[in-house]
Image: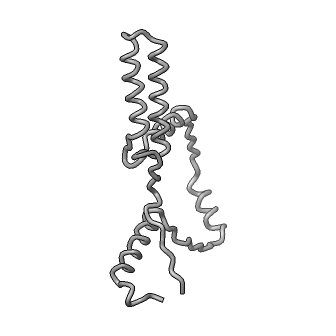
Amino acid sequence: MKQFQVPQFITVEDKVIGPLTVKQAVYVLGGVILIIFSNLIFVPILFWPIAAVIAVLAGTLAFLKINDVPFPTIVKNGFFYFMRPRIYIWKKEDIGKRSEKKAASPQVTVQETPRLSESKLSDLAWSLNIKEKLRGPEEGGG
């Protein structure tokens, strides 16, 4: 039986440009370009504060993670939170009607299939790889 290597660290982005991922490189490059254009447009007394703000913004977009969530995702979620309407409607239901509905409907039991989350999948792949290395090639597995 042929054995295949299970991919690990699938949640980590590839480092493409030096120590930076593609997204990080785009944010840093965009910040550098904005700073160069602001140098051409503004006088030096205005340029330095604007350049500092642009550099901090580009750095946070590229490198800051809060609870392992990238900062651009947090900004996007915050934007949608404030832009979407938040109307919650609660309809009071009589207890008598609710019990009649439950009694009238037939009881059907549906079993859910267990879900495998990304972290559990990563843990499983890690443990399989460790067990394979501990067992060694001489014992074989198939």
- Viewer-closest of 98 and 124: 124
Residue at position x 39%, y 34% in the image: 59
Location of residue 97 with respect to 50 vertically, above or below: below
Q: Residue 90, percent across and down?
A: 56, 44
- Viewer-closest of 56 and 78: 56
Residue at position x 39%, y 80% in the image: 132
Q: Residue 40, percent across and down?
A: 48, 14
- Viewer-closest of 23 and 119: 23
Location of residue 38 with respect to 138 vertically, above or below: above
| Residue that protrudes farthest toward the left in the picture | 134
- Viewer-closest of 2 and 111: 2
Q: How is the image coloured?
A: one colour
Q: Residue 66 appears in which quarter of the rendering?
A: top left
Q: Residue 60, percent across and down?
A: 39, 35
- Taking the image as shown, residue 56 lies to the left or right of residue 23, namely left
| Quadrant into which the N terminus falls | bottom right
Residue at position x 51%, y 76% in the image: 4
| Residue that protrudes farthest toward the front in the picture | 18
How many marks on residues?
0
Location of residue 52 with respect to 6 vertically, above or below: above
Q: Residue 109, percent across and down?
A: 59, 74
Location of residue 136 with respect to 49 vertically, above or below: below
Residue at position x 54%, y 36% in the image: 80
